[in-house]
Image (tube, rainbow, N blue to C red):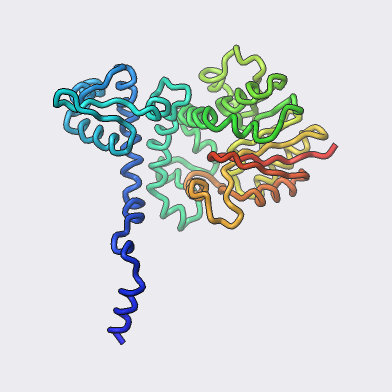
Amino acid sequence: MAESLEKGRSEGTPAADAYPRKILEYMEGFLISKTVFTSCELGLFDVLLGAERPLSAEEISHAVGASQDGTQRLLAACTGLQLLNAHTDDGQVLYSNTEQASVYLTRSSPLSLYQSIQYSSRTIYLCWHYLTDAIREGRNQYEKAFGVSSKDLFQALYRSDEEMVKFMQLMNSIWNICGKDVVTAFDLSPFKVICDLGGCSGALAKQCTSAYPECTVTIFDLPKVVRTSREHFVTEADQRISFHQGDFFKDPLPEADLYILARILHDWPDERCIELLSRVYKACRPGGVVLLVEALLHEDGSGPLTAQLYSLNMLVQTEGRERTAAQYAALLAAAGFTNIQHRLTGKIYDAVLGHKET
C-alpha cells in the first residue's frame, strides 16, 4: 500500500513542483516593496537624475547620506529589479536610472509615484502588519497600527494634517497616471456641470477640464480637505474648478449634470453606498449621470489580482471592499439609476456609468 502511494506520488508530481518558485517569490515580495520604498525615501533616483551622468556607489552614498556598504547593496538590488542601469568604466561600476525610474520614481517628474510610494511605505505597510487580525475580526486596523479610533473612517484616514497631505498626494499621483483614461472611457462632453464628490486634490477635476473644455467642475469635500487642496494643489489658474465644503452623507449636494465618485464607494459597505447614491440621484438633474471610478473585479471572482489585493486593503484600511461591475450596477439601480454601463480601461481603474431619466 505504502509502495503504491509512493509510486503514484512520484508519477503524478511534475518536476517543476520540486522547486516552488512562485511561492518563494510571494514569500519575498515584501523585500522588493521595501527596496523600492527605501530607495525613494533616500532620494536615490533623484540624485542620479540630478547628476546627469552615471555615478559610483561612493558618490551616491555621500549624496544620500548613507553607508557605502549599504548603498552598494541597495544599488545592486535596484539593478536586479531593472530600476537602475549598471556599467563598468575603467574598472569602476557606475549607476544610472532606467527610463521608468526617472519618470515614475523621481520627485520632480509630472508622473511621479513618489508620494504614493511614501504613503504605501508609511501607512499601508504598517496597516498590513495586522492583516491576520483584520481577517479574523472583519474590520480595519487603525487602532492597532496607529492608536487612533476608526469609528469615523476619515478621522482615522486624516488623523493629522501631514497624513492628510500624504493621502492627497497619493490621489494626485494616481490620477495623473490613470485619470485621463477613466474620464474619457465614456463621452462625457454633453455634461457641462460636473460635481466631483470627494474630489480631494483636484487631480481628476483637472483631467475633466482638460478632456472637456466646456465643462466646469465643483470639488465637494470635507472643509479641511478643501482648505489643503487650495493651499497645495489647485491654483487660481484652474479657473473652471471650484470648491464646495461639506460631508456628502449629511450636507446638501450641489446640483449637477454629472457626478463623479472616484474611489469613493469602495470605502463603504453596501447600505452606505446606496445611501450616498440615493442622495446623488436626488440632487442630479434629469438626464444627468453618475460616473463611478473603481478597480473592477471579474464577475467570476477570478481576478484581476490587483483588485483582489486592493479588496484585502479595503478590509485593513476602510469599511468597504472592491466589487464587480454587476455589484456596482445593483447599487446604482437600488438608488434609482438606469441604463447602467461599464467600460474597462486596461489599467487599474475602470468606469461605471448610470443615468437618471429625463
When the figure is inspected, residue 337 is found, relative to residue 47, above or below; the finding is: below
Q: Can residue 224 be seen in this view?
A: no
In this rendering, would 129 be left or right of 281? left
Residue 246, given in percent of the width and then of the height, sits at: 65, 29
Place of residue 290 in the rendered image (x, y in percent of width and height, measured from the top left): 71, 37
> Could you tell me residue 152's position as x and y percent?
55, 40
Residue under the image location 71 percent in, 44 percent down? 341
Front in this rendered view, residue 264 or 310: 310
- Look at the image and tell me in which quarter the N terminus lies: bottom left
Quadrant of the image occupied by residue 67: top left
Estimate the x, y position of residue 78 in percent, counting from the top left.
29, 35
Say if 76 sits above or below 326 in the image. above
The residue positioned farthest toward the top in the image shown: 237
For the image, the number of numbered tags is 0
Position of residue 85 in the picture relative to residue 333 (left or right): left
Which residue is at the far left? 91
Q: Is residue 256 above or below residue 336?
A: above
Name the residue: 20% across, 27% down.
Answer: 88
**Is residue 34 visible to the viewer in this orientation of the structure?**
yes
Q: Quadrant of the C terminus?
A: top right
Q: Is residue 221 left or right of residue 159?
A: right
Q: Quadrant of residue 153?
A: top right
